[in-house]
Image (cartoon, coloured by chain):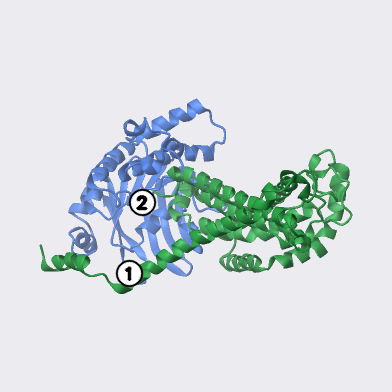
């Protein structure tokens, strides 16, 4: 549960193109770390590097270290499938499996990881996960209905329930609210505040108010220019970033002068 | 409100654009034409087959009347087509998966072309290949089957010495329907949205588990519809079966002996030139039955696909 991640000198490449340059940061457990920055600055790429999802793009690779539990996630012999079991992810667009019911969606990860699991035990974990995602009361009478029949905000909380059902150590969220209306966004933000008691959470967001509202730490990414790699300008406690940032770029971005 | 809005409303009432009207007529005509053709075919079959329905039993070829004449043909048709589908459908799913999820891009494209090319080979070529190459090649395996697995009724034997068996026929048909099934399934797999694949992978799914969780369920209805297309082709295939299968009539599940049930289409092709009178009517009656079978197969497929729309990809 809730592990610390140390990122050391991480470079991310697509083929020969360096997308992200030289990122080092500590991601604290039981806290929310927000990554902000203009479009194309590499923050989503960086997020996906934390659970090795970016490797799905052919020729993608990294240099540097991502250390969790004294284990470099990119050390030879580390299976990306195992990494993803410990570092879960929630995506920009809600993506419950369309052919599965609400129940089956939450159970999907468990069915992958433990082939044999007792029905009563599974029922318990599904309920616990849905309660953890603040969705239980809304769906408890329709567990057998398709997950795609829920509203957008409910679908996203279903995806969060699905992610936490496998009890990961870290939860990555890639703009989880950008496809949602303000009320659903509020529900997800409340949920994140509860989840950080047990999880390490990293969220990419375009919404600076959201970063200021929910996060404990904020990192600002930027690019020097077109074709240049993205880089981490600075990372600090959220109040510090939003009141007295060290770099003028950060100040200009959060005050709305560009981006 | 605005004058533009009023113009538009009045224009819609007042003016009928001739080109629009004409094109609407043409497309409607095309739509109606397909119904007319279908109805025409059905009517032709009914009218031409009618004499066979009312003719006395002893005028029908064989013995025992029309039902006893057509039933073994129906059996042979269904057996050959079902066997071909059982062989081809799983292979088609595997090929489609390889092309969409495993093969390097270049190889995938090449394979795609080859598969489409297979669909373009005329069926008589498949027939000749089945007769000259495949039939002799099955002799050793069928001999082994008859000797060692003879207790299974399918392989009861004695093995045919020519290889022109139901077994060989089903193999040829399987090769023939493989491309169309593969093409349909491949398209569906290609359209599996990335976000569902990512959802599975982010839960710690291996590639195989991702395919099982996200790709196969998403392509489920297309596997079914592709299979039905293939089944339709196998049911109606004429020349290849006429060349390969050495039919002796009768009903048997024994796939490898020299006594094989004929199929409707091949039987028509083989018997038609030498038939006259009520025999021709009886052949057309068997054609009517084939028409009905394919219709029912397609309707069942539709029903199954529609029943699953609740859980389809439409989210």
Say which of A26 and B198 sits in front: B198
Tell me the element at label 2.
Answer: loop
- Which image quadrant for residue A140? top left
Hue used for the chain lettered A: blue
How dense is the environment of label 2, judged by Cα within 10 Å: few (below 14), some, or many (20 and up)? Answer: some
Which quarter of the image is occupied by the C terminus of chain A?
A: bottom left
Which residue is drawn at the image coordinates 32% and 48% (left, top)? A33
- Chain of the residue that carries numbered disc 2 in the rendered image: A
Which quarter of the image is occupied by the N terminus of chain A?
A: top left
Where is residue A166 shown, x and y percent of the image?
46, 38
Classify B202 as above or below A124.
below
Classify A32 as above or below B177.
above
Which residue is drawn at the image coordinates 54% and 36% (left, top)? A114
Furthest-bottom residue in this view: B19
Tell me the element at label 1.
Answer: helix
Residue holding disc 2 = A93
- Chain of the residue that carries numbered disc 1 in the rendered image: B
In the image, the chain rendered in green is B
Q: Is residue B261 left or right of residue A124?
A: right
Residue holding disc 1 = B21
Q: Is residue A200 visible?
A: no
How dense is the environment of label 1, judged by Cα within 10 Å: few (below 14), some, or many (20 and up)? Answer: few
Say which of B6 and B209 sits in front: B6
Q: Is residue A184 left or right of residue B224?
A: left
């Amino acid at each position: 549960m809730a592990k610390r991640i140390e990122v050391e000198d991480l470079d991310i490449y697509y083929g020969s193109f360096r997308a992200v340059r030289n990122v080092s940061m500590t991601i604290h457990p039981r806290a929310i770390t927000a990554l902000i920055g203009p479009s194309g600055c590499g923050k989503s790429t960086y997020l996906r590097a934390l659970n090795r999802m970016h490797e799905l793009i052919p020729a993608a690779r990294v240099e540097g270290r991502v250390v969790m539990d004294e284990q470099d996630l990119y050390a030879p012999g580390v299976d990306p499938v195992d990494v993803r079991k410990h570092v879960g992810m929630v995506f920009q667009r809600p993506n419950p499996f369309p052919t599965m019911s609400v129940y089956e969606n939450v159970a999907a990860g468990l069915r992958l990881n433990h082939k044999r699991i007792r029905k009563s035990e599974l029922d318990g974990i599904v309920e616990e996960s849905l309660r953890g995602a603040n969705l239980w009361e809304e769906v408890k009478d329709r567990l057998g209905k398709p997950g795609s029949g829920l509203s957008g905000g409910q679908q996203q909380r279903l995806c969060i329930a699905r992610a936490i059902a496998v009890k990961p150590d870290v939860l990555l969220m890639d703009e989880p609210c950008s496809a949602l209306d303000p009320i659903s966004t509020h529900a997800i933000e409340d949920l994140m505040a509860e989840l950080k008691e047990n999880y390490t959470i990293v969220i990419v967001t375009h919404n600076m108010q959201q970063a200021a509202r929910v996060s404990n730490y904020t990192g600002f990414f930027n690019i020097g220019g077109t074709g240049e790699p993205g880089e981490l300008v600075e990372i600090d406690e959220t109040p510090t970033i939003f009141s007295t940032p060290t770099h003028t770029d950060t100040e200009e971005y959060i005050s709305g002068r560009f981006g | 409100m605005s004058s533009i809005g009023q113009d538009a409303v009045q224009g819609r009432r007042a003016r009928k654009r001739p080109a629009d009207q004409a094109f609407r007529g043409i497309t409607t005509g095309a739509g109606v034409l397909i119904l007319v053709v279908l109805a025409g075919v059905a009517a032709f079959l009914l009218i031409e087959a009618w004499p066979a329905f009312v003719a006395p039993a002893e005028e029908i070829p064989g013995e025992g009347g029309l039902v006893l004449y057509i039933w073994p043909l129906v059996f042979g048709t269904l057996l050959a087509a079902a066997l071909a589908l059982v062989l081809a459908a799983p292979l088609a799913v595997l090929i489609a998966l390889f092309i969409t999820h495993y093969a390097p891009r270049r190889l995938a494209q090449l394979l795609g072309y080859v598969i489409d090319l297979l669909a373009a080979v005329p069926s008589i070529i498949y027939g000749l290949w089945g007769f000259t190459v495949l039939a002799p090649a099955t002799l050793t395996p069928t001999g082994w089957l008859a000797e060692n697995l003879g207790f299974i009724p399918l392989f009861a034997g004695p093995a045919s010495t020519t290889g022109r068996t139901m077994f060989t026929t089903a193999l040829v048909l399987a090769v023939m329907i493989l491309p169309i099934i593969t093409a349909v399934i491949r398209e569906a797999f290609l359209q599996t949205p990335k976000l569902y694949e990512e959802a599975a992978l982010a839960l710690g799914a291996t590639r195989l588990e991702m395919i099982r969780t996200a790709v196969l369920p998403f392509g489920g209805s297309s596997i079914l519809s592709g299979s039905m297309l293939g089944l339709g082709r196998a049911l109606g295939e004429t020349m290849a079966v006429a060349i390969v299968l050495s039919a002796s009539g009768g009903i048997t599940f024994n796939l490898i002996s020299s006594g094989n049930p004929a199929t409707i289409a091949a039987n028509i092709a083989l018997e038609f030139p030498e038939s006259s009178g009520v025999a021709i009517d009886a052949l057309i009656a068997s054609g009517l039955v084939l028409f009905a079978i394919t219709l029912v197969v397609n309707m069942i497929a539709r029903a199954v696909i529609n029943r699953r729309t609740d859980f389809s990809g439409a989210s």
